Image (cartoon, grey):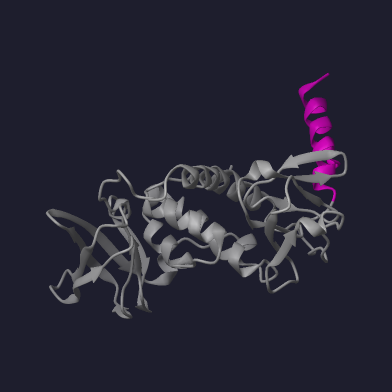
Amino acid sequence: MTRITVFLTLFFLFLCSPARASNEIGYVENFVGNADRYHVRRGTQVLPLKLCLPLLNGDHIEALDDTGRITLRLVGHPEPVVWSRGDKDTPITANEPKDNLLFAFLDWTMESLSPLDDEKRQRVLTTIRGDSGAIFDVPLLHVPQLIAAGKRSIFIGWLKPSEVVQISIVAKSGKRLVDNSKAAGGLWTSPVLDLKPGSYRMTVVAGNSTITGDIQVVNGTALPSFPEDLTRDDIPDTMRRTVQALWLSAQTGGQYQLEALQLIGNDKDVRTAQILQGALIGGTKFNLPK
């Protein structure tokens, strides 16, 4: 069999794969407990549940105990859809979008965030304090950051959330935009700042430790342009922002990670945003999908 024949055969099998027989209608946004308490039945396939798992029409979710509860985001539903044990005989259904829902990007997001989600769920079982033993650090400032100009609040986060810090932002001209603002809890939100293009220095002080980083403010047009799939208006907003932030954070050695954090902000109600926020604050580096 020639290489061309092998390629065409594999390509045909991919196109006819039952896992992609229809367009995605949504994804798993969150679930109670650990993933091994659930699985998804898709025809003859049994799939492990994962954060961001793409869903197809007709999928059945099954839980191993009565406390099972899953939050889904479905196309055409402005609010999240909550699945519970009583829905086990009801297939997941929604109107299919014209095109696949972030086809490659959903898989990439799942592969990137699901392991971090699993790790965090396991850690919750063994310790109550999330930062026990952590060392104060601000990985977001390890690499000079580029963010968009404009009137906006900005977020910055640090490891060891129990640490109380003071934050300052000074322009290259010497103008102080923020002067020793006190913050705690691992994430700080600035007041609304009028950020003009130019160079700034951010300083974060905790006790005897001082961490500084350079921030270059640029016009929004200087930031990377999102792929067309990431700007579609038929994608649930929470997923679009998460995948945009993940995609942006993976660009050019991490210099847009601070801007990526701005996209998801302090969204405590969306699991994907929580996991990505923690990863960005912790300095996790992501690779773009191939």
Residue 38 visible here: yes
Answer with the quarter of the image where residue 7 lies.
top right
Report whether 212 appears left or right of 140.
left
User: Which residue corresponds to the image point at 32% horizontal and 52% vertical from the top-left?
Assistant: 159
Above or below, 204 against 221 in this view is above
Residue reaching furthest to the front: 66
Residue 224 in the image: state x and y as whole percent.
Answer: 47, 60
Image position, residue 99 (x, y; %): 77, 60
Depth check: 47 or 63 in front? 63
User: Is 223 contained in the magenta span?
Assistant: no
Q: How many numbered marks have been drawn onto this rendered protein structure?
A: 0
Asked if residue 256 shows in the view, the reply is: no
Q: Residue at x 44, y 61 (%)?
A: 260
**What segment is highlighted magenta in the picture?**
1-21
User: Residue 51: x and y, percent?
Assistant: 62, 50
Give the dominant element type of the magenta stretch: helix, strand or loop: helix
Which one is nearer the viewer's eye here, 112 or 2?
A: 112
